[in-house]
Image (tube, grey):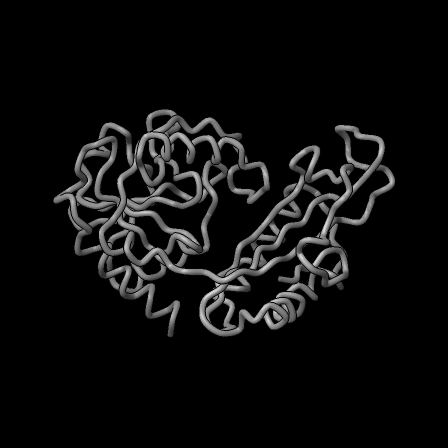
Amino acid sequence: MQVYLNGEFLEQKKAAVSVADRGFVFGDGVYEVTRIINGKFFQEEEHLVRLDEGLKGLKINLNDELRHSIPEISRDLIKRNGHTEGEATVYLQITRGAAFPRTHTFPDPEVPPTIYLSSGPFKPHKELHERGVEVITVPDVRWTRCNLKTINLLPNTLAKQQAKEAGANSAIMIRDGVVTESPNANIFGVKDGKLFTFPASNYILNGITRRVVIDIANSNNIPLITEPVRQDDLYDMDELFFTGTTTDIQPIIKVDGRKIGSGKPGEVVRSIQKEYNNRLYG
């Protein structure tokens, strides 16, 4: 497999960044993962706009020429790796770059950002989409700029590992008594035919798939309420489901060992899955 790193395509095993890279020493960077179906980039522009928002939020300056070349680089990469047929993903990461000495303030003068892309085959989690998943609740201990898709994912990793050790698929994060999101996906709840999700704010990542689901709800007259689900009401929801670029639309059938609704994926999530797949594969 080949990757792209700072202007070069090279074998993945030969790719290396400096130990002074601020992504390595500070987690000072952003990333995006884009889904590809038979060479078509799904919601590509939306991912790139969010990338720009992340770069702006971290004050990482990427020159216009390089920024506008990302789609071309991505397409070249998937051709080189044979990922133009079937399903695949492209991972993109940009850090502030490598700088000595190590200081908490930004390098002065600025250094060139590090830009890295890789691609890989992808297999959808169809079995989980069909039967649903079991999850646990955990405290949301992340910082309060979750709207930026940064490479600082340690709290997410610890939450996901906690779920794994508990025999669950994933976790639902709770902050101040309300549901925010999962370690790697957004969350929707259904009650009495109405769809609930945490409002787009600094406390969640406004997921690309989340936005597609909101558009599906609006297009199909499903009432949408952008209010957080309280933890006290979580177990009484009729349906729950995750949304994400590689998660797709994944029903949640049990939380902390307690059934959600009938304990099986419900009618609303099934209808959204169908419409989402039409858009993804259409």
Residue at x 53% of width, y 73% of height: 84
Q: Quadrant of the N terminus?
A: bottom right
Q: Nearer the viewer, residue 220 or 55?
A: 55
Q: Quadrant of the C terminus?
A: bottom left
All told, the count of numbered labels is 0
Residue at x 61% of width, y 54% of height: 92
Residue at x 66% of width, y 47% of height: 56
Q: Nearer the viewer, residue 108 or 277?
A: 277
Q: Position of residue 236 (x, y in %)?
A: 17, 35
Q: Position of residue 256 (x, y in %)?
A: 25, 31
Q: Nearer the viewer, residue 54 or 225?
A: 54
Q: Kindly give the residue lying farthest to the front in the view shown.
A: 13
Q: Nearer the viewer, residue 94 or 109?
A: 94
Q: Kindly give the residue lying farthest to the right in the view shown.
A: 109
Which quadrant of the view contains residue 75? bottom right
Residue at x 83% of width, y 43% of height: 110
Q: Is residue 251 left or right of residue 211?
A: left
Residue 153, relative to residue 192: is it above or below? above
Which quadrant of the view contains residue 10? bottom right
Q: Position of residue 158 (x, y in %)?
A: 46, 30
Q: Is residue 239 left or right of residue 242?
A: left
